[in-house]
Image (tube, helix red, strand yellow):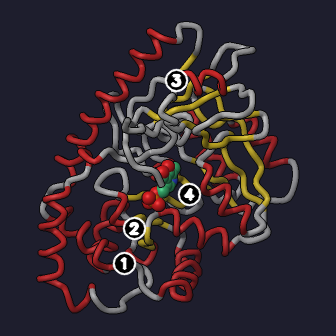
Amino acid sequence: MEAISFARGIPAPECLPVEELADCAQAALERDGATVLSYGSSAGYGPLRDWIAERHGVDPGRVLVTNGSLQGMVFLAERFAGERVLVEAPTYDRPLKILAAHGVETTPIAMDDEGLDLDALARGLESGRKPAFLYTIPTFQNPSGRTLSAERRRRLAEAARERELLVLEDDPYGLVRFDGEAPPTLFELEGGARVAYSSSFSKTIAPGLRVGYFVLPQALERELEALATSTYITPVLIGQATVFEFLRRGNFEPNLERVSALLRTRRDAMLEALERELPDARWSRPQGGYFVWLELPEGADAGALLSRSCPARTSAALRTRRGLRSASSPRTRSEKACADSQPSSGSR
Ligand SMILES: Cc1ncc(COP(=O)(O)O)c(C=O)c1O
């Protein structure tokens, strides 16, 4: 039996534009092979860096293109090793592990249905050391599927300015929207002085290309670029040049529409199944992205439910009293379970 992972944002095989990317990779090598097969800039493939800079209205010197955006998180953790970082509760587990591995103290800030709770953020800012930054995923958050409301975005952008708080807006899912109007990003609202922005082509083109990026204040970009130099000299330019060719051909928007339609069907199937099977539970109704957040009624055993629903050892992420963990054979009683709406046969 084929296992379906409900724990992570992994594109299903049919989401990947395999043939088009094969053609793009070949064209990229033919056009610019001597550049992309050599060592080059630590900040990434020049034409892609320029494309990203233009899209976000910044100087290309502020853009760092990395081997997946998670690699940039490692550089940030190195840069702010031993400091304090505010994070959403719950949040994407991998940054938490990366930050912990660099001795960064993380302070969880509560969320509700509208995203980050700004009163809880104010309390987090007032207690403890001044944080190096706030890590937030405002749109179709991993793992809750929640989106920060437009009003809170404005207030958070203002708070970043007033309190001189660096905010990292991680936004790999924002373009994978099925319904509704996109709210402005924090980066757009604040202007990019206090808000740094990261995104990735993992969910919009293909994760195996390993192309993510950061738009940073200039000084921080230089510092992270130096860390990139001493880590890998040059990121994988062939992946970046393949992405650039895909963009240059005008394939990006049609691919977003195609992928969004595939994911919308999965989201709808998940919501219908929840309606049918768990009428007493509550869940988020994301307008895009990969994640649905499920809250079981008080006293329900999420671990037991997971074993009943996952005879093929399908995985999900459980939020237990001790934190979030991935699970394929649950052992402890849990308060909440979350599952993404993305069937896929892979694991990472
Ligand atoms: C919120 C968030 N940020 C970053 C990433 C990692 O992206 P990349 O594949 O570019 O490393 C993911 C992947 O699941 C994610 O959910």
- The quarter holding residue 251 reads bottom left
Name which quarter of the figure residue 148 lies in: top right
Name of the residue lying farthest toward the front: 1
Give the residue type at disc 1: Val
Classed neighbour count for the residue bearing mark 1: other residues with Cα under 10 Å, few (<14), some (14–19), many (≥20): many
Label 1 vs 4, first from the N-terminus: 4
Q: Which mark is residue 309?
A: 3
Element type at marker 1?
Answer: loop
- Local crowd at mark 3 within 10 Å, few (<14), some, or many (≥20)? few
Q: Which label was assigned to residue 236? A: 1
Query: What residue is shown with label 4?
Result: 195
> 75 left or right of 6?
right
Give the quarter of the figure containing the N terminus.
top left
Instruction: Please identify, in this view, whether the residue under mark 2 or under mark 1 is nearer the observer.
Output: 1
- The picture places residue 306, in percent across and down from the top left corner, at 58, 27
The span from disc 4 to disc 3 (Cα, nearest Å) is 41 Å
Closer to the camera: disc 2 or disc 3?
3
